[in-house]
Structure formats: structure tokens, C-alpha cells
């Protein structure tokens, strides 16, 4: 493949890169104790980007034999595109992979079906009528990246993940959807405790249906669980601090940002609030050591002590900001151009135990998980509908609360935090972005957070 890059440089390209990208994916779906489907997919090809006279173009093909022609096509098309420049980055030569013992593709399908049955049976052990949908997904992602500057990187990342969806009926109806996922081999499944988690989640649904009471709207001190903290970090910090959004380049695709280019250092939250994005967390769903522009990954401190501290960059936006890239460019397949993406975005833990967060709340609500969320296109106005939630009276958890609703701006949420728990937890997610869409694996996360004087609404019934 080096000869293709040499050809493009001889044809007056200023810069060229080539990425051979292979995805193997398979899944099993069980619905109410029955295996409904299984699927196996291979996605394999090459993507090439060329910079000529300051204009960047991308082309791809699923035939390596056509790579030369595709590279020349990108070179031809570049002249019609917007002029850009790329940041100067270190030349890297590296082979890397995620840690694993057993590749997901090496597992006999009977073991996967047995896992799904065990999860399904654990849900049925709870004495309540349910509909159950359980999906297991395994994948292997392999890449070979090379550019005309001399960087050459190969990588391999296996992943295991999926979804458990439980709909419970008892005088009403309520649904719990949770996703699981990590990088690594089949052995990671045991660490997730999915059988126990599914049973506990079903018990929670039963209690909400039997004991849940309607919320009285008003101002409350609240504690939010790590699941909600994580989605707030992802949506209220990660997306708006993607530099392409800040520059308006995602406006017609996935929205813009409340943050402007000159807002670095602006106070946006409590001084105890720190939010990071870190792709180097071992076994994380969003794990990688080098991005798809050949830049070494590192932890990014997006918000530090309540102030906007760092944006997510690729080489193009890094040049515009006069800095180096922080390795945030990823592509979901060979046919997608690398764009700025989050990896594992989370609120950093504090020092408080859960009991300490509770103890000085006289009248409040603990919202552990959500069943619905919404946010506007600039990532400013949030809405979260709680699933598992409890009234707090004089520092003690009382009865379940049905569907408390948080509606607040990013700044109000971040500024209302007065204590942060020490129980950092992560949840798997697929983050969508781009046109055409690129769904990519991430973790969202955080500890429990205590927020003061938040208005809580009652969900409107339809």
C-alpha cells in the first residue's frame, strides 16, 4: 500500500493517508425465551484521504485491487473542496491491540445461547409478567493505517456487548433498557454480572409498579446516579466540546454547540466539577491507543474545576486552534471518513460516600436511572425522565417515585452540583454522529452527584 501513497505524492498531493479497515460482527437475539435471529457480517475495505492545494478529499472501496484508482479519484475531487491545513504530529510506527484471552468469534454459539437463556431465566424468577428481549453482540475491528509522513500503525480490538430490554406488567407497564459493552474477549462477559443485574433490574420494576407514587412538582435537592451523570457528561459536555461542532461543521448533520471558539476558560459549573474523555481506559467500550489519523491517544480534561478547559480535536481543527490534535478522530468503517468523536466521557469522582450525599438532604429525590432523555441541537436544554427514583426525607430513602422529570440548562445542572460521590461507574452506549451516520462504541460515566434546589416536574401522561 505504500506504493499508492508514493503515487499520490508524485501526482502532486500535499499529503495522503490510507486505512485498511475490517469489521467482523455477529449477534444473537432472544425474545421471550426463544432465539429469534442470528447474524454475521463482515465489512472490509480501504479508505483514502488526499490533501491537494489545501483541499481534503475522501474516497473508499471494498476492493483492495481498486485502491489505486480510488486514491486518484480522491486526488481529482480534492480541488472542489474547502481549503484546510493539518496540524503537525509525530511520526509513529506501532502495532497495538486491546487485551483479550478468547476472541468473541472463537466461542461456540451454544455458549452464547446458554448465556441468553440464563439471563432470561433470571428475569422470569421474579414474580411479575414480563416481555424480554436480550441481544448479544460480538465484534473484531482490525485496522492498518499509513500516511505519507511516515506513520504506520496496525491495531486489533475485539468487543463484546449487547442489550437487555425488560417490559414489566402489573397494574401498569414499565420498561427498562440497558446496554452493556467492553473491549476484550469473551472472558469480559463474566465480569459484567449480567444474570444478577437483569434479575435486580426486574425486581426494581416490580417495586416501582407496586409502590411507586406520583411526584409533587417543586424544588428539591436531588442525587442523580452514575447512569444519569454519564449521559449528562456525554450530551452536555462531550458533544458541545467537539471542535467541528464549535466551528459549525456539524450544523446540518447532528447539531451545533452552545460553546464558541473564544470560550476557553469560561466558568460553566461548580468548582468541584471535572469532566474527562479518556480512550486509554483498559477494557472500555471506547478503547483505543491511536486514532484514525495516527495520533497517540491520551486523556482529555474537557472541564476542569468548573471551567471549559479543552476541546476534542482532529488534525484539521487542531491547526485552526493553533495546537496539536488530541487524537479524537475515529471512523466506524472503511467507507466512513474519520471525524471527531468521544471515547469514554465521564465526570471525575469525588470523596463522598452515598450515605454522606444523603445525610443532609431534608426533602429530596434520588434518581438512580432514566427511561427517557432529550437535549436540544446546541446541547443546552436537557430533559431526563427518571426510572428508578426514591423520595429522600431527613437523609433517608423512602418509597419509590414515579417518573420524576428534570428540565434544566447545561449551566444550571453543572453549577448546582455541591458534592460528588466516590463511586465511579460506566455504562456502554453507541454514539451517533456524521452524515452518513457513524455509530461508534463509547462509555458514559460518573459517580453519584448531589444537586441543590432543582425543579422537578411530573411527567405528562398521554
Image (cartoon, grey):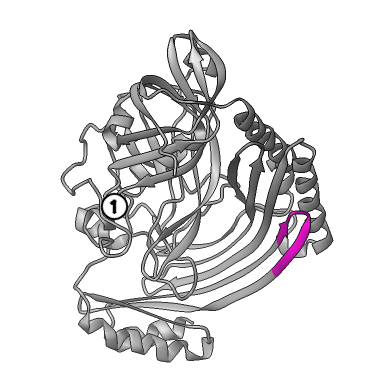
Quick one: quadrant of the C terminus?
top left
Which residue, as the protein is rendered here, is positioned at the far left?
262
Magenta highlight range: 29-38
The picture places residue 86, in percent across and down from the top left corner, at 27, 65
Q: Secondary structure at mark 1?
A: loop
Pick the front one: 150 or 234:
234
Which residue is painted at 49% across and 79% down in the image? Answer: 46
The picture places residue 256, in percent across and down from the top left corner, at 25, 54
Pick the front one: 208 or 256:
208
The picture places residue 242, in percent across and down from the top left corner, at 31, 52
Q: Would you say residue 193 is visible in this rendering? A: no
Position of residue 31 relative to residue 179, above or below, is below
Secondary structure mostly taken by the magenta-highlighted segment of the chain: strand
Which residue is painted at 22% across and 59% down in the image? Answer: 248
Residue at numbered disc 1: 377
Q: Is residue 308 left or right of residue 48?
A: left
Which residue is painted at 73% across and 65% down in the image? Answer: 36
Amino acid at each position: 500500500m505504500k506504493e499508492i501513497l508514493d503515487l499520490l505524492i508524485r501526482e502532486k498531493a500535499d499529503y495522503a493517508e490510507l486505512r485498511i479497515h475490517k469489521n467482523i460482527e455477529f449477534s444473537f437475539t432472544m425474545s421471550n425465551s426463544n432465539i429469534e435471529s442470528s447474524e454475521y457480517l463482515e465489512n472490509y475495505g480501504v479508505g483514502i484521504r488526499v490533501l491537494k492545494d489545501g483541499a481534503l478529499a475522501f474516497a473508499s472501496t471494498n476492493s483492495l485491487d481498486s485502491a489505486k484508482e480510488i486514491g486518484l479519484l480522491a486526488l481529482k475531487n480534492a480541488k472542489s473542496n474547502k481549503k484546510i491545513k493539518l496540524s503537525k504530529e509525530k511520526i509513529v510506527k506501532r502495532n497495538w491491540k486491546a487485551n483479550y484471552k478468547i476472541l468473541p468469534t472463537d466461542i461456540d454459539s451454544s455458549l452464547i445461547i446458554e448465556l441468553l437463556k440464563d439471563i432470561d431465566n433470571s428475569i422470569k424468577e421474579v414474580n411479575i409478567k414480563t416481555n424480554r428481549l436480550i441481544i448479544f453482540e460480538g465484534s473484531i475491528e482490525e485496522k492498518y493505517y499509513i500516511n505519507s509522513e511516515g506513520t504506520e500503525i496496525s491495531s486489533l480490538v475485539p468487543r463484546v456487548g449487547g442489550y437487555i430490554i425488560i417490559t414489566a406488567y402489573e397494574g401498569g407497564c414499565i420498561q427498562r433498557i440497558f446496554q452493556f459493552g467492553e473491549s476484550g474477549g469473551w472472558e469480559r462477559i463474566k465480569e459484567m454480572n449480567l444474570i444478577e443485574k437483569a434479575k435486580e433490574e426486574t425486581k426494581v420494576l416490580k417495586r416501582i409498579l407496586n409502590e411507586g407514587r406520583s411526584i409533587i412538582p417543586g424544588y428539591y435537592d436531588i442525587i442523580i446516579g452514575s447512569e444519569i451523570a454519564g449521559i449528562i457528561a456525554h450530551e452536555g459536555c462531550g458533544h458541545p466540546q467537539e471542535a467541528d461542532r464549535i466551528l459549525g461543521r456539524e450544523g446540518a448533520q447532528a447539531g451545533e454547540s452552545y460553546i464558541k471558539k473564544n470560550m476557553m476558560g469560561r466558568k460553566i459549573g461548580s468548582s468541584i466539577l471535572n469532566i474527562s474523555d479518556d480512550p486509554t481506559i483498559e477494557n472500555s467500550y471506547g478503547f483505543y491507543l491511536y486514532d484514525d489519523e495516527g495520533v497517540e491517544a491520551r486523556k482529555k480534561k474537557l472541564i476542569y474545576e468548573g471551567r471549559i478547559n479543552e476541546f476534542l480535536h482532529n488534525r484539521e481543527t487542531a491547526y485552526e486552534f493553533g495546537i496539536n490534535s488530541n487524537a479524537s478522530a475515529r471512523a466506524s468503517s472503511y467507507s466512513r471518513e474519520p471525524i471527531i468523536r468521544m471515547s469514554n466521557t465521564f465526570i471525575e469522582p469525588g470523596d463522598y460516600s452515598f450515605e454522606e450525599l444523603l445525610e443532609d438532604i431534608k426533602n429530596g429525590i434520588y434518581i438512580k436511572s432514566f427511561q427517557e432523555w432529550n437535549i436540544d441541537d446546541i446541547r443546552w436544554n436537557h430533559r431526563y425522565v427518571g426510572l428508578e427514583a426514591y423520595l429522600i426525607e431527613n437523609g433517608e430513602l423512602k418509597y419509590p417515585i414515579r417518573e420524576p422529570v428534570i428540565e434544566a440548562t447545561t449551566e444550571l445542572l453543572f453549577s448546582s452540583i455541591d458534592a460528588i460521590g466516590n463511586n465511579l461507574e460506566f455504562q456502554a452506549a453507541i454514539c451517533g454522529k456524521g452524515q452518513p451516520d457513524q455509530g461508534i462504541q463509547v462509555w458514559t460515566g460518573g459517580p453519584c452527584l448531589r444537586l441543590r434546589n432543582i425543579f422537578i416536574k411530573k411527567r405528562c401522561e398521554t
